[in-house]
Image (cartoon, helix red, strand yellow):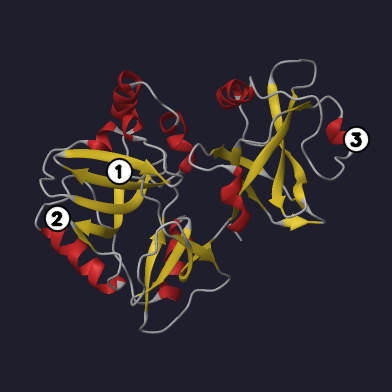
Amino acid sequence: MSAPRPMLATKTDHVPVGSEWSHEVKWDGVRVLAEVLDGRTRLWSRNGNDVTTAWPDVADDRDRPRDLLVDGEVIALNDRGLPDFRVLQDRMHVRSARTAARLAGSLPATYMVFDLLRLDGEDLTGLPLAERRARLAGLAEGQGLGGWQVPAAYDDGPMLLEATRAQGLEGVVSKRLDSRYVPDSRSPHWRKLAHRHRRSYVVGGWRPQEGTSDRLASLLVGEPTPEGLLYRGRVGSGIGGKVSRQLAEAVADLTRGSSPFADEVPRVDATGTTWVEPVLVVDVDTHGVGYARLRQPSYQGLRADLDPTALQDQS
């Protein structure tokens, strides 16, 4: 059996209105599909990797006796009590069960389940979202999800957009109530709107802190296009001591002799850069893109759940 893949939302610039739409909070976490089969829970990343080891608190099998497949987001809270992708960085790359168990105690995660894809052997993906959500709610009321949570859905999208903005949440996802679930696709029937300009980019090189040769201080990132990997700028904000060490470890075996970017990198950025194979993906917050360069970019995290091919359709 191949690993399940989620349905993805299409980026939009406005929240749709009308009774045919349902609206949910856009969580700043990691997309995970969870499967309970024959009494065992397995967790899958959006690109089909088994990530069960990294999330032992989510994969805990107690109180989930029925076979099912659900879609949701793993979140963790920052010191302001808000979901924050950066808090998950120490956990999402863990492959040691002992380390994962220790981190689950100090950095607890919550699984927010927003869709039910299979229940007791019945494939529900062909049913309308409204019916899938109703069955999910019934499952939650019957304690069939254990410690997993089902977030609320709202019929007033503009209201939710303003509420999430005021509360410092990431944004809103709007879904047509009659939409079917099509795995491994990006659907126009699901639309996402974030309050911040956050996108994923491919790492093409890194630069050291001034006066050193080995302390990673900034990344050179690009955007995959039909013309190749186009340079979008240098990201240094958000890369502190601990993050620097994590990134240095991630790029350690990826060094190459020439730039992976299809266009020319300005000399001021290229000088002193160590080029790397373009296989790592990072999230970056910006104030937008001006003249094809990121404005005031801030590093948000390394995306082990994404590869460069997944970025071709992120617009």
Q: Position of residue 248 (x, y in %)?
A: 62, 22
Q: Amino acid at mark 3?
A: Arg
* Precedes in sequence: disc 2 or disc 3: 2
Circle nearer the viewer, 2 or 3: 2
What residue is disc 2 on?
120
Quarter of the figure with residue 243: top right
* Precedes in sequence: disc 1 or disc 2: 1
Q: Position of residue 169 (x, y in %)?
A: 45, 55
What residue is disc 3 on?
267
SS category of the residue bearing label 1:
strand
Mark linked to residue 110: 1
Quarter of the figure with residue 43: top left
Q: In the image, what residue occupies the spot 52% across and 43% down?
A: 306
Vertical order, 3 against 56 (above or below): below
Q: Nearer the viewer, residue 303 or 5?
A: 5
Side (left or right) of 196 relative to 92 = right
Q: Nearer the viewer, residue 246 or 46?
A: 46
